[in-house]
Image (spheres, helix red, strand yellow):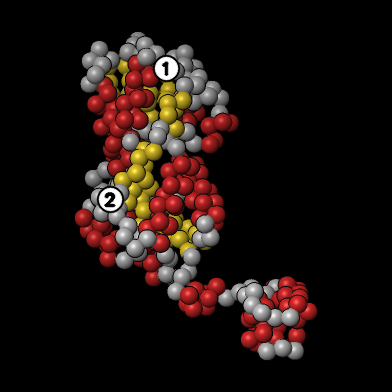
Amino acid sequence: MGDMYMAITVNQIAEKCGVSRTTVLRALNGGSVSKETKERILQVAKDNNYRPNLLARSLNHGRTMSLGVVTINIENMYFVQSLNTINKEADKRGYFTNIVVCDDSLEWEKKLIQGLAERQMEGILINPINKGESFEQFLLSLHVPVVCIGNQVSGKITTVQVNEMVATMDAVKHIVSKDYEKIVFVCPPLEMKETQNTYTHEQRELGFRAAMGMYPDVEMNVIGRENFLQDVQSVCKDGLNKKTAFLCSGDSYALMIMQWAAKEGYEIPKDFGLMGFDDISVLQYISPKLTTVSTNVEGVAATAVVELIQQIESEDYSPKSIYLNHKVLDRDTL
């Protein structure tokens, strides 16, 4: 490896400058050193790619100033948006983020969380796919502050979210106000609810069913499997004699329906209505503009960071459930 990639050590800086190691450390850390000597030391450090040993510094101070973040995947724009905000908010507060991806694997998620704790993360942010009392006990046994985003584990672990039930009820109310006679709720994660933490989507389903109970004249249906496009196709082929809208539990599912509809020759909203959930940033580039529910992705992520740091730095922190505001965004697909 060439010299341009080799970081110089404190001892080497001392040798080049003809001073002691202690003098170099004082200069690098803002201590008392003559102006001329300090300038010479800093210039040598800069010219030779000096990088401070943050691990050693953290051992001396008992702090790593690092947060662990476990995400499900980095292909879904919801998680990308959330991660970008987490990274920015942590950096504003002097914390470094270590992001790992569990790829929908229950065991891998636990291994990653354990690994972050062992690597001295001061706190960990998760959107968990594990659930239940055993997972709760696993998190508590780490003795590391944890905050959940969206998917709740228990009342003993802080969660930041929106009120998913109320948000979905507001979505149904909005669709009904457009005179739709049939609403189909598309929620693919329900297929995994027996084995994975699908709390967010389950709450949305509960909100959908509760809302539909208030509109007995409006026909309802729930599609809850991964191969949902087959069921959407069946609904359309069986006939759209009633004014029909599809309400999706995530914008990504709505975008897949839009793509399928374009290939099949359907026009939205002429042939059927469509509504998403979350208001992911990519929607600004899609036409027609998707009607959706903003679940305040950035706000939830930023609040989770603030809450985690508060938990890290407080001696008497109590876990809580934090609910942020949602908003129905009326656009062009209903």
Q: Residues within 10 Å of mark 1 (few under 14, many from 20)?
A: many
Residue 90 at what x, y percent from top left?
Answer: 50, 55
Q: Secondary structure at mark 1?
A: loop
Compare marks 2 and 1 and give the one earlier in the sequence. 2
Q: Nearer the viewer, residue 309 or 267?
A: 309
Residue 37 at what x, y percent from top left?
Answer: 75, 81
* 92 to 284, vertically: above or below: below
Q: Nearer the viewer, residue 155 or 24?
A: 24
Q: At 53% from the left edge and 24% from the top edge, which residue is drawn?
A: 289
Q: At 55% from the left edge and 54% from the top edge, which residue is drawn?
A: 92
Q: Residues within 10 Å of mark 2 (few under 14, many from 20)?
A: many
Label 1, on which residue? 272
What amino acid is found at the position of numbered circle 1 in the picture? Phe
Label 2, on which residue? 153
Q: Nearer the viewer, residue 289 or 306?
A: 306
Q: Secondary structure at mark 2?
A: loop
Q: At 32% from the left edge and 40% from the top edge, which residue is drawn?
A: 200
Residue 267 at what x, y percent from top left?
Answer: 49, 17
Residue 193 at what x, y percent from top left?
Answer: 27, 43
Query: Residue 160's quadrant in the figure?
Result: top left
Q: At 48% from the left edge and 42% from the top edge, which residue is drawn?
A: 298
| Label of residue 238 in the image | none
Q: Quadrant of the C terminus?
A: top left
Query: Residue 208's quadrant in the figure?
Result: top left
Q: Quadrant of the N terminus?
A: bottom right
Q: Nearer the viewer, residue 79 or 149?
A: 149
The answer to whether residue 148 is visible is yes
* 59 to 128, vertically: above or below: below
